[in-house]
Amino acid sequence: MADTLNKEIYCSDACGWCCTSLRYFITFRKNPEPGRIVLYEPVWREFSSPIGLSQDNGVDVSIHFCPFCGKAFPEELEDKWVETLMNELGIIRKENEPYEEFKKRVPPEFQSDEWWRKRGL
């Protein structure tokens, strides 16, 4: 829990923690907590909300505005991530390649928010 809190405080400006309600109800996609209504994926700077009957049975829907104060979130960067991997490093996901196998070829910098912070995105 302490790591999550430190991460939230660290990226409050760049990630769009726009209000105390968002800060309270957010959780990181890698470690979702029951009852959290906003998920955050730092690699792609993506906000979503889980929809479904249970934590194991549902989907995440991208959200572009804070559900509490209405402020717009920063631009999502998944497409830019793929483009940067391809253009700068020549890394492309092979057809039918499982994501977990592809991820093994992705440098550590691109498995966190480090890649977009370094580029000033």
Image (spheres, rainbow, N blue to C red):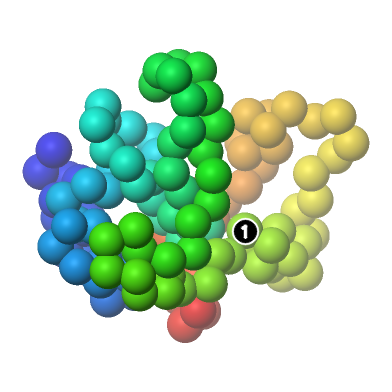
Q: Is residue 111 above or below residue 101?
A: below
Badge 1 marks a residue whose secondary structure is helix
Q: Quadrant of residue 113?
A: bottom left
Q: Position of residue 70 (x, y in %)?
A: 35, 70
Residue 20 is left or right of residue 17, and the answer is left
> Is residue 109 visible to us here?
no
State whether residue 67 is above or below residue 51.
Answer: below
- The location of residue 34, given as percent across then percent down, is 26, 27
Residue at the spot of label 1: 78
In the image, is 40 to the left or to the right of 100?
Answer: left
Q: Residues within 10 Å of mark 1 (few under 14, many from 20)?
A: some
- Left or right of 2? Residue 11 is right
In percent of width and height, residue 17 lies at 26, 66
Where residue 94 sits, quadrant-wise, is: top right
Q: Position of residue 100 (x, y in %)?
A: 63, 29
Residue most extreme to the left: 2
Give the residue at x 27% y 69%.
69
* Residue 95 visible from this viewpoint: yes
- Residue 69 higher or lower than 27, as above or below: below
Give me the residue at 77% from left, 69% from top: 87
